[in-house]
Image (cartoon, helix red, strand yellow):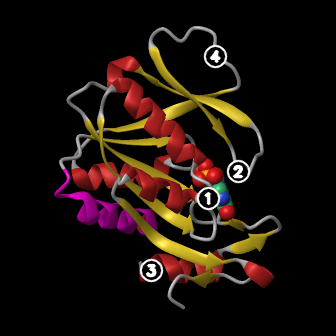
Amino acid sequence: MKLLEDKIRKDGTVLPGNVLKVDNFLNHQVDTQLMDEVGKEFARLFKEDGVTKVVTVESSGIAPAMTAAIHLGVPMIFARKHKSLTLTDNLYTANVYSYTKQVSNNISVDKRFLSSDDKILIIDDFLANGQAVDGLLEIAKAANVEVAGIGIVIEKSFQKGRETIEQTGIKLESLARIASLDDQKVTFVGE
Ligand code: 5GP
């Protein structure tokens, strides 16, 4: 998605550890016009896939998941993060290691919001090693819901997330694919 790539080039900064900082349009301040276009693009890519709900993880996934859900005309659920969980009877849970924060969080979705006739679209802001998506897939499996696809705003294609998802056979669409962040420079796949 050209608009997104241009924005990453203009406003993204590369931090040590192969982390791309985009807190001026995605992760802290949100460019609402751009996020609307992102949502439109996800809706275009997944409109034939029978999506009944969009699912993400708080907090950075919420903005793109929200606009995708609006354009698909379905509800959006964000899995909540907890340091620890005690009462889990009414929750679907998974453990997720955070790439950027280097801590593990439990994520959970209330059982009331997913049922076996749902078909979900998983959306996240970044795909790195695939742990966040994996956690959501675990929740989908526990809830016995079908996964229509996975939509990623920014994929770091040099990390192993894409490969892991491709092995599941689930449809994966990333709006920007980064081949390298070497020398503090963003290079997109195909450049
Ligand atoms: P994964 O679980 O695929 O390893 O990492 C994805 C999660 O880590 C995303 O939800 C995102 O919050 C965070 N993340 C991974 N890489 C980056 C990055 O380069 N920049 C930012 N801002 N977040 C990242």
Residue 147 image-quadrant placement: top left
Label number found at residue 85: 4
Q: Quadrant of ligand 1?
A: bottom right
- Farthest residue to the bottom: give it: 191
Residue at image mark 1: 128
Tell me how far mark 4 sits from mark 2, CA to CA.
21 Å
Label number found at residue 63: none
Which of discs 1 and 3 lies nearer the camera? The answer is: 1
Residue 27, above or below 114:
below
- Label 3's element? helix
Tell me how far mark 1 sits from mark 3, CA to CA.
21 Å
Q: Residue at 79% x, 84% y: name it.
A: 183
The mark that comes first in sequence, 4 or 1, is 4
Q: Would you say the residues marked 1 and 3 are in contact, meaning their CB atoms lie under 8 Å apart?
A: no
- Label 4's element? loop
Residue 186, above or below 42:
below
Tell me how far mark 3 sits from mark 4, CA to CA.
40 Å
Residue 151 x/y as whole percent: 40, 57
- For the record, the magenta segment spans 34-49
The mark that comes first in sequence, 2 or 3, is 3
Q: Would you say the residues marked 2 and 1 are in contact, meaning their CB atoms lie under 8 Å apart?
A: yes
Residue at image mark 3: 3
Tell me how far mark 2 sits from mark 1, CA to CA.
7 Å
**Disc 4 residue type (three-letter):** Leu
Neighbour tally class for label 2: few under 14, some 14-19, many 20 plus, Cα within 10 Å: some
Between residues 112 and 177, which one lies in front from this camera angle?
A: 177
